[in-house]
Image (tube, rainbow, N blue to C red):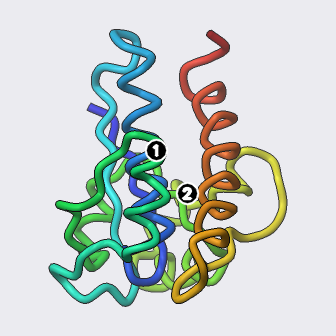
Amino acid sequence: MKIILFVCTGNTCRSTMAEGLFKKMLEDLGEKTKGIKVISAGTAALKGQKASKNAVRAMDEKGINLKDHRATFVTKELTQEADLILTMTSNHKKQLVYMEPKAKEKTYTLKEYIGKEGDIVDPYGQSIDVYKQCSKEIEESLKVLIEKIIGKN
C-alpha cells in the first residue's frame, strides 16, 4: 500500500481539505487507485480538534464530509510510514525534514511536487470565500498530482 501524507499547521483546514478532496478523486477513479491510502496531519495540531467550520462548509459543497475529521499531530512515525509527504508550505517541509532527516527524499510541498512554485496560503480564520479559493487551489494541484501518480485518464 502506498501512503500519501498531507501536512499543514493545525490539520483543520488545508491538509484536511486536501485529504478529503484527494480521497474523493481517487474513489471516483475506481479500481486503478486501489492500494493508495491518504492521511493528513499538522505540525502544530491539537489532537482531536475538529475541522474548521469553513473547511467543513467548503467541502460540503463538493459532497465531502469533514464533520467527523479530528486533527492529528504529525509524528516521526507518521513520516516514516508515509511513502510521499506533501506539505502546504515550504516551512512545513523544513519542519518535517528537521524532525526526521530521513524523510527528506520523500517530502515536498504540494506545488513543488507538481512542478509549480509557491505555498498554499492558510485560510484559517478567514471568510468562506477564502476557504473556497484555497479549496480550488488545492483541487487544481491535486488534479496534476493524480496525473503524475496514476497517469492521464
Task: Specify whether 32 is left or right of 39.
Answer: right
Three-letter code for the amino acid on which mark 2 is drawn: Glu
Residue at the location (33% across, 35% down)?
Answer: 2
Which quadrant, please, contains the C terminus? top right
Depth order, front residue of 108/60 = 60
Mark nearer the N terminus (2 vs 1): 1
Which quadrant, please, contains the N terminus? top left
Pointer 2 residue: 105
Local packing at callout 1 (Cα closer than 10 Å; few below 14, some 14-19, many 20+) is many
Q: Secondary structure at mark 2?
A: helix
Three-letter code for the amino acid on which mark 1 is drawn: Leu
Pointer 1 residue: 21
> Residue 142: horizontal and vertical position, in percent?
60, 42
Task: Specify whether 151 is left or right of 5.
Answer: right
Residue at the location (23% across, 63% down)?
Answer: 69
Up the image or down, 5 lies above or below 140; here it is: below
